[in-house]
Structures are given as structure tokens and as C-alpha cells.
């Protein structure tokens, strides 16, 4: 199996506060991986480092052998925690923008997904509900044929039916050579679609293992293990 | 949407059991083509790699087989399916007997209760 992501001694400090502490991490291609940890454990920091939105204080981070930059942005599809879409634009304008911007954007795939959800491409973002906006955003991200998808809290803030749709979309569009990294704290909702999980605790990786290994060795769900490890 | 899976047991084992049951109960008949890994993964709400692992297990058991180009099918070996059905029944009975024993029932009491239950059910 080839490695899509490798971090060595990766640290990030914000002033005195250390958000990531010398993280060593290696992700294989073709996996759906949960990045799990309580608020403030460093999940978003790690994802922002992968996407080149932050620079490491120390250590290295390689994506498909390259440091974050133009080359890696071509192969990493990123769903940020907060939307960056211009509310005044129509869905179709944003699709055109993505087509221009990303060589790997599959327009027909995006069109199919919008149709399935009966989202009218001529609608402006501001006229859509919160849940629909999140779906549009996910459709944009999953319509790219990327090698690494980073989804930062993709199901927070939407109702359970929309969550199911989002998880379906992830399974349906997942290409077996791509890796999907999903950060979330809604573990029980996602754990059935994950191959492996990473527990992040105070900026350090406390566990990286296959979901079924947790179930075989400890006879408990990832959710139950998480509650134990991170008991307040 | 998703299949109802227990939280404490390995997911792929539960997928294997569900598909075995679908074959034993006749939902998938001998020789039927079954949906693709992707379709089944979406239906079950699980990771496609996990579903693939379950399929490989079922193929190893001989319950499913792959035709290189046309997909995956249920075995036409009815003897095997029947054998699995009996094994599953035996496991259920064992589980039942264990629980009845824990409640303090002996073999004869249990037989008597089963007969009574069947009579009343008529």
C-alpha cells in the first residue's frame, strides 16, 4: 500500500499554546479514516496544515511525497469547518468556478448529485437552508477526483436524515485508491463507514487502529472507547 | 436506511451473518446475482472495504462465488445452504438451552414447555 500522507515530528504552536506536539502519522491510500478527538485536541490544526493554510512550527508533512503547496492542492479536496461560498452566487456559478479551478472536477457527477437532491442550480446560496448549503458544499468537494479528501466536521449541524445522505454520498463517491480523512466528534454516526480511527488527545496521537480491531480486542464500539479515553 | 448493526461486535462479521441469513431465508436464491460491493455498502451504511472483506469471507465459505466479468452470485449448492441453515438452527438452540439452564429449567421441563407453547400456538 502506498502512503498518501506522512508526518514526522509535526508540531504547531500558537504563541505559547502548543496545538500539535511532535506528531508522527502515516496514512495509506484507499482508506476512510476518522480523525477523532474532543474540542481543542488539534483536529482542525492538523487538517489546516495538510491543506497549507498553516505552516508547521517544527517537523515535516508530506502529501504523496510533496510538501503542501500548489502540487498537493491539485490532489487534496478540502471541506472546511465553515463555508467560504459567496452567498450571492448561484449554485451553477460556483460549479463553473470549481470547473475552472480544479482539473479533477467532474461536472457531470456534481450535476447528478444536485439532481438527486432536487437542488435547483439557479438558486442563490443565501436562499438555501443550512442543511442544503452543507450538502452543496459536500457535493463540490466530493465531485473532485482527488487522492486525499479532508472533511472537517462534515455532519455537524445537520439533521439525521441529511447526515445519512452525506454518509451515503461519501460511500458512493469514494474511489478505492483515494483516502478520506473525516474529523468529527459524532462518532456513532460515522464509525460504521470508517476503516480506521485516529484518536487525538492534547495535540498528540493516542491511538491509531482499525475499527474492527477495537471491536475484536475490546468488544466495544469506537464511540464507547472514545467516551472511556476522553472521560472528563 | 442502514442495517441495524450491534455496536460491540466486529462489523464485517455482522455483515457476513446478515448475508448468510439472506441466503438461508431465500431472500437471495441459489444462483441469484447479488448487488455490487458498493451498492451493498451503501445499503448497509458501511465502509466498502469492510463489505469487501465480508464478501471474501462468504466466498471462502463457498456461499458466494465470483464470475470474473459478470459479478458475484449465490452458490447453487443447495446441500451447503441446507447445512448452513441447520448449523444456524443448532446455534440458536444452544443459546436458548443455555438461557433456560440459567433460569433453572432441566431438559424435561424445557421439552414440556416447548410442547405446551406449540399446542397453545395452534
Image (cartoon, rainbow, N blue to C red):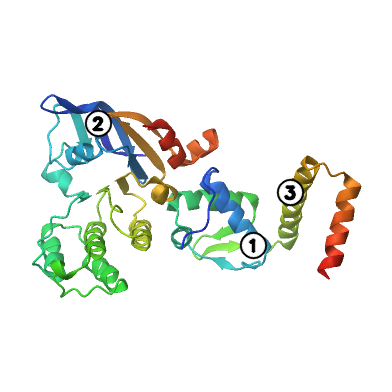
Say which quadrant the N terminus of chain A sits in. Answer: top left
Percent position of residue A72, x then y:
17, 44
Chain letter for mark 2, please: A
Tell which circle, 1 or 3, labels the residue nearer the N-terminal end. Answer: 1
**Which residue bears the numbered disc 3?**
B91
**What residue is shown at x 9% (from left), y 67% (from top)?**
A89
Q: Label 2 belongs to which residue?
A: A7
Numbered label attached to residue A116 = none
Q: For this rendering, which residue is in front, A191 or B34?
A: A191
Q: Chain of mark 1?
A: B
In whole angstroms, how far apart are the C-alphas of marks 3 and 2?
A: 48 Å
* Label 1 – label 2 distance at C-alpha: 46 Å
Placement of A2 over or under B57, stated as above or below: above
At horizontal 38% and vertical 31% (from top left) the residue drawn is: A207
**Res B67 seen here:** yes
Q: Real-space Cα distance between discs 1 and 3?
A: 17 Å
**Which label was assigned to residue B23?**
1
Query: How far across and down, in percent of the image, does residue A182 sit?
Result: 31, 46
Residue B108 higher or lower than A7, as above or below = below
Determine the secondary structure under disc 2: strand
A197 or B103: nearer the viewer? B103
Amino acid at each position: 500500500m502506498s502512503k498518501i500522507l506522512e508526518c514526522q515530528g509535526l508540531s504547531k504552536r500558537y504563541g505559547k499554546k502548543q496545538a500539535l506536539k511532535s506528531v508522527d502519522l502515516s496514512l495509506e491510500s484507499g482508506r476512510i479514516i476518522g480523525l477523532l478527538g474532543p474540542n481543542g485536541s488539534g483536529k482542525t490544526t492538523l487538517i489546516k496544515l495538510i491543506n497549507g493554510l498553516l505552516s508547521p512550527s517544527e517537523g515535516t508533512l508530506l502529501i504523496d511525497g510533496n510538501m503542501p503547496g500548489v502540487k498537493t492542492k491539485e490532489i487534496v479536496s478540502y471541506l472546511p469547518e465553515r463555508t467560504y461560498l459567496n452567498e450571492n452566487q448561484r449554485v451553477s456559478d460556483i460549479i463553473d468556478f470549481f470547473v475552472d479551478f480544479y482539473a479533477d472536477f467532474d461536472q457531470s457527477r456534481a450535476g447528478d448529485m444536485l439532481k438527486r437532491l432536487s437542488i435547483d442550480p439557479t438558486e442563490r446560496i443565501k436562499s438555501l437552508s443550512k442543511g442544503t448549503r452543507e450538502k452543496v458544499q459536500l457535493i463540490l468537494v466530493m465531485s473532485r477526483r482527488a487522492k486525499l479528501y479532508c472533511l472537517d466536521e462534515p455532519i455537524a449541524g445537520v439533521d439525521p436524515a441529511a447526515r445519512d445522505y452525506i454518509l451515503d454520498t461519501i460511500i458512493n463517491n469514494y474511489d478505492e485508491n483515494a483516502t478520506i480523512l473525516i474529523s468529527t466528534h459524532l462518532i456513532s454516526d460515522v464509525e460504521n463507514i470508517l476503516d480506521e480511527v485516529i484518536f487525538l488527545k492534547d495535540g498528540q496521537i493516542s491511538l491509531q487502529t482499525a475499527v474492527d480491531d477495537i471491536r475484536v480486542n475490546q468488544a466495544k464500539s469506537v464511540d464507547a472507547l472514545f467516551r472511556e479515553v476522553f472521560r472528563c | 436506511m442502514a442495517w441495524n448493526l450491534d455496536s460491540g461486535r466486529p462489523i464485517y462479521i455482522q455483515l457476513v451473518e446478515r448475508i448468510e441469513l439472506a441466503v438461508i431465508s431465500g431472500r437471495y436464491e441459489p444462483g441469484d446475482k447479488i448487488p455490487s460491493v458498493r451498492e451493498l455498502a451503501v445499503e448497509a451504511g458501511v465502509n466498502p472495504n469492510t463489505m469487501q472483506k465480508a464478501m471474501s469471507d462468504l466466498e471462502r465459505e463457498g456461499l458466494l462465488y465470483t464470475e470474473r466479468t459478470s459479478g458475484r452470485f449465490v452458490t447453487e449448492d443447495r446441500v451447503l445452504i441446507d447445512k448452513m441453515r441447520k448449523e444456524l438452527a443448532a446455534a440458536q438452540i444452544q443459546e436458548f438451552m443455555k438461557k433456560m439452564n440459567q433460569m433453572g429449567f432441566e431438559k424435561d421441563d424445557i421439552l414440556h414447555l416447548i410442547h405446551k407453547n406449540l399446542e397453545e400456538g395452534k
